[in-house]
Image (tube, rainbow, N blue to C red):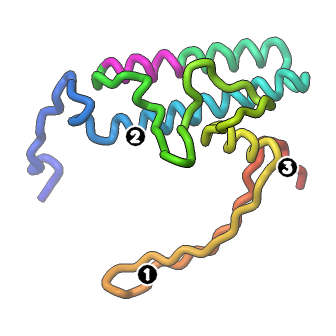
Amino acid sequence: MTSSDIPIQAIPNSPKSSKEAGLAPLLLTVVELVRQLMEAQIIRRMEAGELSDKELDRAAESLRKLEEQVIETCKIFDIDPVDLNIDLGEVGTLLPKSGGYYPGQTSTSPTILELLDRLLNTGVVLQGEVDLGLANIDLIHAKLQLLLTSKRISK
């Protein structure tokens, strides 16, 4: 079978119901979490005097464009941007509610965004092992060691 033998299905131009949007809400939620996390790191670096005015302007413009793209994509899939903030029950919410989050300020009920920002600011080492298999046969074994920080790591 060649690629020309594969039937091509039309993709709808404007998916409407957010319930039918599939992975779009989840993907947009992850993008928005990362966008807000980058914004927090930019604020931290700005306050520490680590960014030039030119770098700060570039970063601000990039964040503004990314936010516009998230909002536009939400419109395409008929998703209310407020719905991107997942309530995780006792853990709290993924993103801050209206009013936002300012890096370095603590809140009475921190969000996942705030916790991730704190981890990036102080750094964390994660270690683990993963075995992937099928039919009770281990096929892939991975040993992982990850250093996650927003600081530069010297060699």
Is 91 located above or below residue 40 in the figure? below
- Residue beneath label 3, please? 153
Question: How far apart are the two marked residues, 3 and 1, measured between alpha carbons?
Answer: 33 Å
Task: Indicate left or right for 43 with 33 as reference.
Answer: right
In the image, is residue 71 part of the stretch drawn in magenta? Answer: yes
In the image, is residue 59 part of the stretch drawn in magenta? Answer: no
> Label 1 is placed on what type of residue?
Leu
Task: Indicate left or right for 111 with 11 as reference.
Answer: right
Q: Give whichever of discs 2 and 3 has the lower sequence position.
A: 2
Is 150 located above or below residue 53 in the figure? below
Residue at 63%, 13% (x, y): give it. 61
- Residue beneath label 2, please? 26
- Residue beneath label 1, please? 139
> Label 3 is placed on what type of residue?
Ile
Circles 3 and 1, Cβ within 8 Å, touching? The answer is no
Image quadrant holding the C terminus, namely bottom right
Task: Indicate left or right for 48 with 100 as reference.
Answer: right
SS assignment for the magenta stretch, majority? helix
Return the residue nearer the eye: 63 or 47: 47
What label sits on residue 24 in the rendered view? none
> Label 2 is placed on what type of residue?
Leu
Residue at 56%, 33% (x, y): give it. 95
Return the residue nearer the eye: 151 or 121: 121
